[in-house]
Amino acid sequence: MMVKTTVSKVVLLCLLFLALLPQSTDAQTNQCPTCWVPIARHRLVTNVNISANIHGYGELLPKNYNPNSTQKHPLIINMHGRGGAGPGNDPYWICLAVCEGLPLKIEQGVVNDFETVNGQPVSYIVLTPNYQLPNANWNDIVNMLNYALANYPKVDRNKVYLTGNSQGSSMIMDLMSSSATNARRFAAVVPLATCNSQTSSGINNMISNNVHYWGLTAVQDWTCNPANTISWGNAMVNNAPHLGRLTVTPVYNPNFNHDIARVWESSWTDNGTTIVRWMLQYSSAAGGALPATLGEYDISLRNQQVVANWTTTLESNTDYFIIERAGADQQFKEIGRVQAAGNSSETNKYVFTDNVLLKGTSYYRVVLVNLDGVKEVYELRKITNKDFKTAIAVSPIPATTTIQLAFELETSQRLNFFIKDINGRTLNTWSANFSSGYASLPINIQ
């Protein structure tokens, strides 16, 4: 059941006898009390449909991240170990995922926010998907990458890296073994304490696609045999010494020999380099993209129709384009297809018109599908249909733990919230700034 009322500069919620407190997103708030160090910098994203086994993730953006700037940032996708697995539908599970490895070390402040590469400071994005066992596999990583490229337009597609611990490390190496197409989307991989054995397909896919590899393991790992990482590392070093690297570390945690998270710290170096600095120096020719060079790209509202225009100047083995649309909730659905050129070195022009105009804010994007089925998602575009009345929705009703306040704004503005009881007594007040478009605010009522 949804209850709606008009939104103005002041939003009044009359909820009987409930003293409601908003969930804080303040950077100084510890979001994960179950973790042994405060988790304050991450944004915990829950209930998103990334894949069958990933429905949430931890987001760590650099301090200088500006979605409106032209600056691009490298992306590190971090795959946690078995102990961090979960359904991703609650912050608790995301906390398990980020309370280890690289995300944890960044929260501790022992990893630099940027590294100097070729004389220039480079800051980076870290996304840690919370995958669910027993069915999570390498295909979920592919879906996470596609999601990241679609939803983080400031990602530098030529600088996408993959790292993980234990179970996550094994998923990474399964991905490298899956196909050359999947391997070439990453500039470098850093698997820690890998649990699976080396495969010839994985080695060949990395070498043939110029994927840099750095494997690390503790000398006496009792959980995952060090021989696994050593076999991968030796195969890479012996067959492609310019791509391969192997480090066997001491046992840093006598209580848990499997734990080598210390290698992420900026004070830890091997031959004079940190792991993050080592990754950031490499670029990928594929860069997560398919063999099509995008020229013009415009999606706009014209005469009560949404028209998508785009061009390509080079295509190789392209199959077709998918046009997707989403409402304010950004749940995308396919609304049409356009056949691609296949192989072409000429300029190709494409157009698609959507005559079904959604009220309020909607989002569109174009997806290129290659002949081998791999997708590239182009940047989304926001369309605002001003012929609508702003409203809020409160759900679920009744509720015992959390209510979700959802609303849509035509312009960016600051909203003041008041919560009162049936007698008009003010129980709580707060203010927050919101951008135009859809917003969702969870409120803890426990």
Image (cartoon, rainbow, N blue to C red):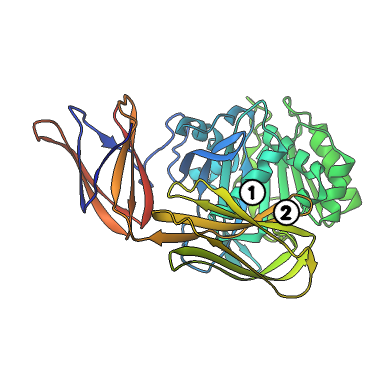
Does residue 200 appear in the picture of this structure?
Answer: yes
Residue placed at 81% from the left, 34% from the top?
228
> Looking at the picture, which amino acid does disc 1 mark?
Leu
Between 327 and 54, the one lying in front of the other is 327
Does residue 64 appear in the picture of this structure?
Answer: no
Element on which disc 1 rests: helix
Residue 125: where, in percent of width, then height?
Answer: 56, 53
Q: Residues within 10 Å of mark 2 (few under 14, many from 20)?
A: many
> Looking at the picture, which amino acid does disc 2 mark?
Arg
Residue beneath disc 1: 145
Where is residue 159, by image quadrant?
bottom right
Find the distance from the CA under tag 2 to the CA under tag 1. 9 Å
Residue 206: where, in percent of width, then height?
Answer: 82, 50
Placement of 89 over or under 237, stated as above or below: above
Element on which disc 2 rests: loop
Placement of 300 over or under 335, stated as above or below: below
Residue placed at 26% from the left, 55% from the top?
414
Q: Is residue 142 left or right of residue 392?
A: right
Residue 194: where, in percent of width, then height?
Answer: 75, 35
Q: Is residue 132 left or right of residue 281?
A: left
Residue beneath disc 2: 185
Between 70 and 270, the one lying in front of the other is 70
Assess whether mark 1 and mark 2 are in contact (beta carbons under 8 angstroms). Answer: yes
Q: Tell me which label, 2 or 1, sits earlier in the chain.
A: 1
> Which quarter of the rendered picture does the N terminus lie within?
top left
Between 284 and 134, the one lying in front of the other is 134
Q: Residues within 10 Å of mark 1 (few under 14, many from 20)?
A: many
